Image (cartoon, helix red, strand yellow):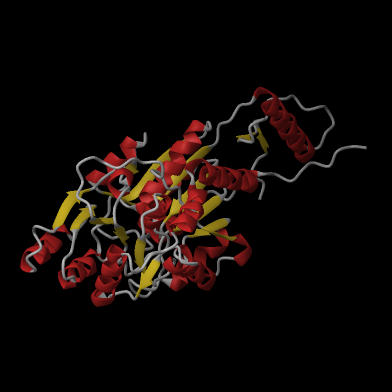
Amino acid sequence: MNRGCIGETATGRAVSSLALVTPAAGMGRSHRTRTVCLAWSRLRLIVGLCDVLVVRVVAKLEPGGAQLSLLRVARALAERGHRTRLVAGNATPAGLQLARAHGFEAEVMGSGADLQWVCDPGFAAWLAPRLASADVVHAHMLGGWWAAARAVPDDVPLVASEHNGYAWWGEPPWAAMAEVAERVDRFYAHGPGARAGAVRAGIREDRIRPGISPVVGMDARPRPGLPSPRIVFTGRLSRDKAPDVLIDAIARMAAPPAVLMLGAGTMLDDLQAQVAQLGLQRVVRFCGWVDEPGPWVMGASVQACPSRDEAFSQTAVLAMGLGVPVVGTNVDGFPETLADRRGIMVPSEDPEALAVALEQVLAGRLRPDTAAARVWARQFDTERVAAVYEQTYSDLRQAPAPELAA
């Protein structure tokens, strides 16, 4: 596919080409076009212009790690001169507010289906005119990248990001995924489950890369007035994050410290009822969604990550970057994140094991290598992550170099 030419500024930023040079008479059309593109790319190198339109598709816009990741990358790319158009299948009011806080107004289709996991031809049809002018399309979540693959023009690169494994929630639509697999030019798999699913769906292995997410707040200072010692939970109050398992574990501890639950989600009412039933109202505090959790996490005794499914835990990485011990579960991406004693792992869905691990960390009898964890976490700096995606967009838009006359 001919996807236009691209150059780079002196700072290494990708720039798209535009045919503004009058071609010499007698040149063939293909040679004229490629020569003009090359000349314009060189001109942009000199001038230092940068303007790539990335249409970013998200199946479900709500407060969550995947959404924070894509919004942070988009904002960092905007600072590098690139434009983002944000389109969503579904969105919650809090999700729209989160996008606005990062400088983006989302256009939303609206659907009664959970488009994170549903392959909806209607979503693809709605996307088609909105992708027509894109330089690059980057689509997030199964329902997003499937629909984008059906709708994106042939000459526009498609990048897909999967932020979750496919196994825990039900049988994936493998046949539908296979139908569009060849159209995906680059697939970012956040965790082993996402990678295995991409391979099974027929995504070419040479197009699959490990997904990376920017993590902010690793230079945070402690928020004044927070209890100490304390256990912190940060994330969506949803089944995959397993806050109910954490509350059950807290009830099993002999003398639990204060527990701060930072997050919002569909499980809030049930979790509050669970806390009341277990008599933990003086222990567990629901703090709501927190845009910048770093100051709450900094100085905590332990970060609890009791997930049933976790491809890449920004929560865990933030705590690691702040030197806070992490207790996670042995699911999907956690064994890699917490490897080499960077954190403590317990079985998923095991509140007794979680309670024991929390008590041992609080007592100092079990301690991960927080210094190594801090060093490892720093690789997820926002600017570094944004540069990786910027280079990907540049590589995918790169046209073959023209054959120059001797």
Asked if residue 389 is positioned above or below residue 197 in the image, the reply reads above
Q: Quadrant of residue 103?
A: top left
Q: Position of residue 363 (x, y in %)?
A: 28, 65
For residue 150, say whether it is visible.
no
For residue 208, say whether it is visible.
yes
Count of labels shown?
Answer: 0
Asked if residue 372 is positioned above or below residue 395 in the image, the reply reads below
Residue drawn at 33 percent across, 45 percent down: 294
Nearer to the camera, 192 or 233: 233
Q: Quadrant of residue 170?
A: bottom left
Residue drawn at 61 percent across, 35 percent down: 13
Residue drawn at 52 percent across, 46 percent down: 385
Q: Position of residue 216 (x, y in %)?
A: 40, 44
Image quadrant where one finds the C terminus = top right
- Residue sitting at the far right: 406
- Residue sitting at the far front: 364
Q: Position of residue 293 (x, y in %)?
A: 30, 46
Q: Position of residue 39 (x, y in %)?
A: 74, 29
Asked if residue 80 is positioned above or below residue 180 in the image, the reply reads above
Residue drawn at 67 percent across, 39 percent down: 5
